[in-house]
Amino acid sequence: MGNFPPLWTEWNDRYRDTVRDFWRGAMPDVRELGDRLAGSSDLYRRGGRRPYASVNFVTAHDGFTLRDLVSYNGKHNEANGEDNRDGSNDNHSWNCGAEGGSGSAQVNALRRRQLRNLAATLLLSTGVPMLVAGDEMGRTQDGNNNAYCQDNPVGWVDWSLREEPGWRSLLELTARLIRLRREHPVLRQRAFFNGRPVHPGGLRDLTWFTARGREMTEADWYAPGRPWGCSCPGRRCRSATRWGASSATTASCWCCTPTTARSRFTLPAVPGHSPTRPWWTPPGRTRTPPGHPSPGRQPGSAPGPLAAAAPGPRRRGGRAARLSAGGRPAPGMNFPAGGAYW
């Protein structure tokens, strides 16, 4: 991987495996995840390639669907007629506590949260996102990860899922994320980050920070299970559009709480903004929608919410106004486990 010349793009299976492992709680630290979220420059920078050389994906036509990825620990390919020998055994999946369909409201709520977290991670990462048809509305193959021979409902897209209340929220979230990505060039970088200020005395093009608002140290990268975030200044960001125009946009900020506990975040200081005034507004979330039961704390559960504070107009009052930047605490504003904000 990464050895093709410029103009070639590649399916980034290291992105796939890293994101799957992170959300099922199988990664010892966040070093690999940082590379994948930022465009995989370690794989594609050589030879003058750009972030769009990386085709990011969590699922593909082969393997589990996104819904099956959070519903099965192992493949169930008996219907293929090969005694379940076909298909990959290395799926990096987690069933959230029950194999296959479950009548547990707690298990199903956790699975839906995981689906939203995976979708948000994919569509907010640097690179080219690839989403398999049907994943945006909870398509399942009943655990079959090699359904090439199933010319029947197992291998088809069930469009009626769009009308089911239980899956409509995932479809709507996916649409919002796609629209957000389309409208804000900061989420579509055309050059790799280098960690240096975009302009003298300004903000770095990418900053990783802890829940206390300070930059991550080497020890923080090796620490498992700690909340972390990253921010990218949108205004006058390094990358230009394909027509050469400046890609001025609002800033983006991700906050991730990879635990089952609530997390309090202090955002890093931003030049020109008062520490007592918010500089972002979370226009979306992957938190359990109203009316759905909260999964609560689960023994051995996967990381908690991805919280992505992404472009949005500044506002006063409400939750956004209770966030602060520049080293001061954010009174009254915690990120609950199982919720995501961007």
Image (cartoon, rainbow, N blue to C red):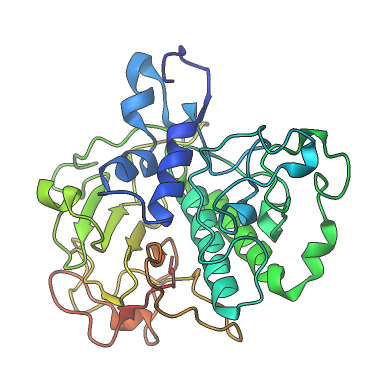
Residue 281 visible in rendering: yes
x, y percentage for residue 308? 40, 62
Residue 244 visible in rendering: no
Can you say whether 15 is above or below 134 in the image? above
Q: Position of 271 compared to 57: left or right?
A: left
x, y percentage for residue 262? 31, 77
Q: Position of 279 compared to 96: left or right?
A: left
x, y percentage for residue 233? 31, 52
Can you say whether 169 is above or below 143 in the image? below
Residue at image point 16% right, 68% down:
212
- Which quadrant of the figure contains the N terminus? top left
Can you say whether 30 is above or below 110 in the image? above
Q: Position of 114 compared to 320: left or right?
A: right
x, y percentage for residue 305? 41, 67
The foreground one among 29 and 159 is: 29
Residue at image point 74% right, 33% down:
82
Number of labelled discs?
0
Residue at image point 50% right, 68% down:
286
The foreground one among 84 and 316 is: 84
- Which quadrant of the figure contains the C terminus? bottom left
The foreground one among 277 and 141 is: 141
Please tell me in which quadrant of the rendered image residue 192 appears.
top left
Please tell me in which quadrant of the rendered image residue 57 appears.
top right
